Image: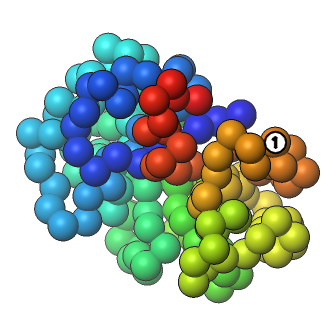
Amino acid sequence: MLKYYFINKFDTNLISKQDKDTTIIYRNYKSYNLEDVIKIKKYCKKKNLCFLLSNNIKQAIKFNLDGAYIPSFSRDFAHLSYSKTRNFLIIGSAHNLKEIKIKERQGCEMIIISSIFKKNENYLGLNKFKLISRLTIKKIIALGGLNKTNLKYLNLTNCIGFAGISFFEQKKGP
């Protein structure tokens, strides 16, 4: 199962705990520190981890990263005219059917759907998550409230992986 770890700062202690199936997504909406992007890229390359930049596809292409992440609030289509490398991965996130259809039109190869377990304003629960994930042909990634106890329930869905923050920051790691 693929894993996607959202980070907002460069911390080698947390990144070094991750295995080869983990993709690092740098998601800092306040301000991008371009030096951090370069440091994370070099560190991920050394550890053989995939690295994506959030909400800035142009910078991700410029720095020759593995791909980019488009958050649910982004409705921009300008990146469709950018020339990308063949293996450049675009992942988007969505909370409902309308956002899923936008992510499909934005050319996302995978869609992160939230929230499967975390009871917040976007809470879906397992059954609604399964229903909404069947409405797209894109690969689905689960997000929200995952822990070692409820991780086994992902086998009941058609998702190919999961994403999170706190799950990856546990003392022993996944």
* Residue type of the residue flagged with mark 1: Lys
Corner quadrant of residue 41: top left
Residue 82 relative to residue 93: left or right: left
Work out whether residue 110 or residue 168 is closer to the camera in this orientation and state it: 168
Instruction: Residue 20: give x, y in percent of width and height.
Output: 53, 20
Residue at 82% over, 75% down? 128
Instruction: Residue 46: give x, y in percent of width and height.
Output: 32, 14
Corner quadrant of residue 65: top left
Corner quadrant of residue 50: top left
Q: Which quadrant would the N terminus be assigned to in this image? A: top right
- Would you name the residue on which mark 1 appears? 152
Residue 156 appears anywhere in the view: yes
Q: Is residue 65 above or below residue 129?
A: above
Q: Which quadrant would the C terminus be assigned to in this image? A: top right
Work out whether residue 118 or residue 60 is closer to the camera in this orientation and state it: 118
Residue at 46% over, 49% down? 165
Residue 167 relative to residue 33: left or right: right
Work out whether residue 14 or residue 72 is closer to the camera in this orientation and state it: 14
Q: Is residue 115 above or below residue 17?
A: below
Residue 104 relative to residue 138: left or right: left
Residue 84 appears anywhere in the view: no
Residue at 49% over, 73% down? 72
Instruction: Residue 161: give x, y in percent of width and height.
Output: 68, 43
Residue at 51% over, 28% down? 173
